Image: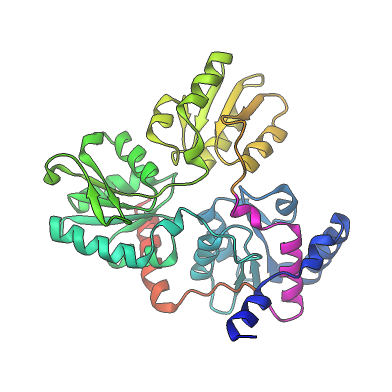
Amino acid sequence: MSILNMMNKKMMMPDSYKELPDEEMKKRILHIKKKYGEKLFIPGHHYQKDEVIQFADATGDSLQLAQVAQQNNKAEYIAFCGVHFMAETADMLTENDQVVVLPDMRAGCSMADMANMQQTNKAWEKLTDIFGETIIPLTYVNSTAEIKAFTGRNGGAAVTSSNAKHILRWALTQKKRILFLPDQHLGRNTAYDLGIPLNRMAVWDPIEEKLLYDGDVQEIKVILWRGHCSVHEKFTVNNIKSIKERDPAINVIVHPECTHEVVMQSDFSGSTKYIIDTINKAEPGSKWAIGTEMNLVQRIINEHPDKQIESLNPDMCPCLTMNRIDMPHLLWSLEQIDKGEPAGVIKVEEYITKDAISALNRMLSIS
């Protein structure tokens, strides 16, 4: 057996865990949580399954959870129930002696994977050939540590869906143009909200390695990386039309990772926190169609029996990569920690961490 295969085998959960009864898994997870106490911290992203969220010590969005982990200096182990880029951020923000693990290393993010360093370096070279030093990069926190480091190294900042408008406004005081990675929809919707017309936005295609724009390139204010969220892009204008025809009184609320057309035809749009807060404050009996990840929508439905809530797209599936983490993987991950053989350890190299942290800190200082 090759070394690579041996490593892969060590990183993979044995099939026997899939055959365990739920009650047995729950009992063993709770036993380890009790045994380790404050030495173990389990953050759970909003999009996780309920079977995982029930064990979370904190729930929230990706940056929020990483910051909570940063503040928790008592934890020796952090089992991050999210996806790879989230665990990377947690590792970068926590102390060197704290161990961050991802219960299933296959839990990635298709959006983050749409911008790698090879593509980004080529894009930056070609774009600076065209525009000189007039571009500042911004990256959504839903990106790899390397992309965050690139952004920090070139004077830019990270953004969240909550603060994107504020950070873009700041960026335009720094340089004439913005390169926004990796989600074109969040970038487009935010720039449009700031009064930048669509005809002053271009798209960079990392596969074709070219700028997609009709007109004088010197008129471009925002260059959008051709990336997207595979979940939020599935909400359509037809979904809105269908639901409004059935019930004109229903409120449509969507995440800004949805396409521009969907955001424009919705009644409300905003971050995950904004969606949760809006539903929490809504009047009993109000009607809502939510355009975001299905696990979160279902949780919101369960928490608000006094309101009529449904998914904007009834055929929507949960985030497939996020859902790789389930109760068997969480149990296996915790038992590997208990054996002194933690699997799925996330460790970002120091030179990447330094520049990535600068992008995150710049965002926080602006906010």
Viewer-nearest residue: 329 or 348: 329
Q: Position of residue 298 (x, y in %)?
A: 67, 37
Q: Is residue 223 above or below residue 347?
A: above
**As drawn, is 220 to the left or to the right of 57?**
left
Q: Quadrant of residue 280?
A: top right
When the figure is inspected, residue 170 is found, relative to residue 235, above or below; the finding is below
Quarter containing the N terminus: bottom right
On whether residue 312 falls in the magenta region, the answer is: no
- 29 displayed left or right of 342: right
Q: Judge whether residue 182 can be spotted in this image.
A: yes
Residue 80 in which image quadrant: bottom right
Give the total of numbered labels: 0
Rendered image coloring scheme? rainbow
Please give the range of residues in magenta: 320-342
Pick out the residue farthest to the front: 1
> In terms of depth relative to the viewer, which is nearer, 241 or 159?
241
Q: Is residue 325 magenta?
A: yes
| Residue beneath the point at 76% across and 76% down | 338
- Residue 102 image point, x, y percent: 62, 66
Measured along the vertical axis of the image, is residue 11 above or below residue 6?
A: above
**Residue 302, image x and y in percent?**
72, 34
The secondary structure that most of the magenta stretch takes on is helix
**Above or below for 161 versus 289:** below
* Residue located 53% across and 17% down the image: 244
Q: Nearer the viewer, residue 365 or 324?
A: 324
Residue 116 left/right relative to 71: left
**Residue 292 horizontal/vertical position (percent):** 55, 38
Q: Is residue 247 visible?
A: no
Say whether residue 127 is left or right of residue 247. left
Residue at point 67%, 61% (across, down): 42
